[in-house]
Image: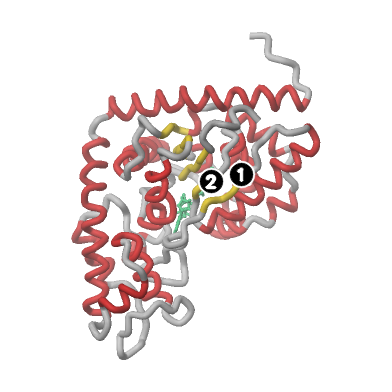
Amino acid sequence: MDNTTAKKVMLSGIQPSGDLHLGNYLGAVKNWADLADEFDCYYFMADLHTLTVRQNPAELRRRSTQQLAQYIACGLDPEKNTLFIQSHVHEHAELGWILNCYTMFGELSRMTQFKDKSAKNAENVNGGLFTYPSLMAADILLYQADFVPVGEDQKQHCELTRDIATRFNNIYGETFKVPEPYIPKVGARIMSLGAPNNKMSKSDPQGCVFLLDKPEDIARKFKRAVTDSDTEHCVRYAPQEKPGVANLMSIYSSVTGKSFDEIEREFDGKGYGVFKPAVGEAVIEHLRPIREEAERIIADKAYLSSVYTEGARKAQYIARKTLRKVYKKVGLVEKPF
Ligand code: ATP
Ligand code: LTN
């Protein structure tokens, strides 16, 4: 592969199908900001992927650029990371089509996200929802990514991407780097504050803390967080027995850097009535500068446009090279212009 001496490549995307929440942040974006010096990093708004579920067009446009503002506010410096909108680099859709032809019906049928989303949207189980993972594979393979930083729920899609890349390489010779998922130790699966057996998700606004939520809303959501019926209100890390408390401990640990042992000691004998608002306060203080910075950037439309324009240009330069190679390998006639 080209540039073996160059930095390893990190790439990830999030669908602008809702506003960013604490799960997206702790499971994904927060960890991305620290990677910029060591890796060559690409992060995008997966707007094409959102079309697998009906969207309001004006809302989708708003959320795509607001998500970019939130990426930047979370510490992704556009000078050090390539930040772009997926649909601006048409190579994604083109390679997505090709990879569809190297992805098996049986493989796609086994994807948990497909099963979940088709159950939730029974009236619109469209072809895009089914072939979603081939487009995701294209997103990753176009950039010859080494690592894909995501939350736990995306591991299955990353594994399918590896299978598709390996299959293609076996037929046509070394074409794609076979990527690995890069999953954080803490925060990889933040659960809903209202139903701690379900992952935190934008489709459950009460159990979900959004990065742009006002401090009073965050405080209220944490005060109401579901814990358990332990009469001693013991703050102890036991994910099976006490999923609600374990989730709050993971959140607290992620935003303060404290270990589970330290947290247990800090709240020893204090009960949930002290613990829950303390987690809320820590989250509020952690998110405050991010929200303020995001609001400032959202108002600066010209800046946002300059960032995604430059991002698309840089991304396309790389994507085009991979796509050209793939077209040639599969037997398409070289484009004359
Ligand atoms: P939906 O609710 O529509 O399924 P989502 O809220 O799960 O969407 P995605 O766009 O699917 O958000 O996820 C974006 C990134 O955030 C992915 O890397 C995903 O793994 C991560 N992520 C999403 N939810 C969580 C969560 N609860 N805990 C940790 N990481 C998460
Ligand atoms: N499927 C992911 C979003 C996504 C993605 C990607 C993540 C689309 N393309 C490429 C990493 C790499 C999700 O639903 N969170």
Residue marked by disc 1: 179
Q: Which residue is mark 2?
A: 148
Q: Which mark is residue 82?
A: none
Residue 250 horizontal/vertical position (percent): 38, 67
Contact between labelled residues 1 and 2, with CB atoms less than 8 Å apart: yes
| Mark 1 Cα shell of 10 Å, populated few (<14), some (14-19), many (≥20) | many
- Badge 2 or badge 1: first in the primary sequence: 2
Relative to 195, residue 287 above or below: above
What is the crowding at mark 2: few (fewer than 14 residues within 10 Å), some, or many (at least 20)?
many
- Assess mark 1: CB under 8 A from ligand 2? no
* Residue at the image point whose x is 40% and y is 48% from the top: 29
- Mark 1 is on which residue type? Pro
- Relative to 142, does residue 252 appear above or below in the rendering? below
Name the image quarter holding the C terminus: top right
State the separation of the CA atoms marked 2 and 1: 7 Å
Question: Does the Cβ of the disc 2 residue fall within 8 Å of ligand 2?
Answer: yes
Name the residue furthest front.
5
Residue at 46% from the left image edge and 26% from the top image edge: 312
Q: Residue furthest bottom?
A: 231
Q: Residue at position x 57%, y 33% from top?
A: 143
Percent x, y of residue 287: 26, 53
